[in-house]
Amino acid sequence: MSAQILDGKGLSARLRARLRQRAEALAAQGRQPGLAVVLVGDSPASQLYVKNKIRACEESGIHSLQHCLPQETSETALLELIGQLNVDEAVHGILVQLPLPPHIDVRRVLAAIAVEKDVDGFHVHNVGHLTIGNPGLPPCTPAGVMALLEDAGIDLAGKHAVVIGASNIVGKPMALMLLAKGATVTICHAKTRNLTQHTIFADVVVAAAGCPKLVRKQMIQNGAVIVDVGINRLPDGTIAGDVDFDEVQQIAGWISPVPGGVGPMTVTMLMENTLRAAEQSMFCCSQGEK
Ligand code: GUN
């Protein structure tokens, strides 16, 4: 028996059509949602990610502004640009593509983005909101995973979820979101001694380790839900996830493919956050006018 597919591409197309209607409704009230994307340097991978985000804006009716800065851009110049975007009323979301060049302090940059425009959900205030269960802007990749699981009707209450990877961007917020839905969560990471000892008892495994084909068939139990966050470029130029898809899909209950799983969902959640930020800004303005 082979696993059912967590189809991020299909779900994204459906969600983006709905986002477009919301964007058009806002535009009709004179407030087209706007996303500013800042790219420093010329990493081909980052350029590709940014291109995908700009294309998604077009599909979702969001105005995009791209700022491509040279690799040698100073931290001061980047902070100045962020300061301008923070007060630009046409900009509702600001995304600074990571990683940044090593001479720039990423923490200082993320902290400089206005919390209400932090559509990546990386600002410590939004991390805090997520931690205590406040509504805020959630980070896009784990939010995309949760949307995929919800769309498939997978109930997480009481389930044992294992997250592989403890990054600030994916692993840690992923664990918090699963916990908020009632799962019992284990976070595994590079120093975890026996990974299989944890994954073999998992009802849900989210692989976000950045290690191609790390998760093998013998590491999971029959019927487990397997979500693959990995996007790894192999020496032959092909892309592989963190899960050995061909092998694992033979025994999993559900599995997300790479490409076409979490990747498009991440970008769709970025659009969702931008829409939410724009709607929220409108609400704030109308409140202020009273
Ligand atoms: N680099 C890799 N993933 C991401 C992401 O989700 N947001 C940003 N800003 N940069 C990234």
Image: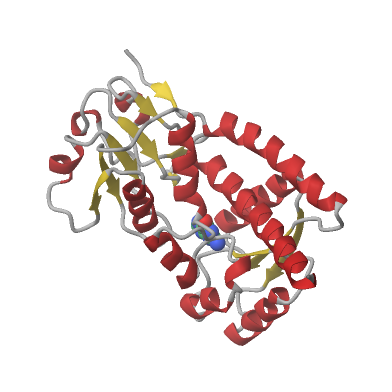
Q: Which percent across, then down, holds residue 209?
A: 33, 50
In the rendered image, the quadrant that contains the N terminus is top left
Total numbered circles? 0
On the question of residue 115 being in view, the answer is yes
Q: Nearer the viewer, residue 218 or 273?
A: 273
In terms of depth relative to the viewer, which is nearer, 26 or 105?
A: 26
The answer to whether residue 237 is visible is no
**Seen from this angle, which residue lies furthest top?**
1
Q: Residue at x 61, y 54 (%)?
A: 273
Quadrant containing the C terminus in the rendered view: bottom right
Q: Position of residue 174 (x, y in %)?
A: 38, 51
Vertical placement of residue 275 versus 149, above or below: below
Q: Is residue 13 above or below residue 275?
A: above
Is 97 situated above or below 171? below
* Residue at screen point 82% across, 58% down: 31
Q: Quadrant of residue 17?
A: top right
User: In percent of the image, x 45 and y 45: which residue is there?
Assistant: 231
Q: Position of residue 280 (x, y in %)?
A: 67, 60
In the image, taking residue 8 as reference, residue 133 lies left or right, namely: left
Of 12 and 76, the residue lying toward us: 12
- Kindly identify the residue that appears in the image at 58 percent across and 66 percent down: 118
Residue lying at the far bottom of the rendered structure: 76
Q: Is residue 258 left or right of residue 82?
A: left
Q: Estimate the x, y position of residue 257 in percent, counting from the top left.
A: 45, 31
Relative placement, left or right, of 198 versus 189 is left
Q: Is residue 14 left or right of residue 109?
A: right
Q: Quadrant of residue 86?
A: bottom right
The type of colouring in the image is secondary structure
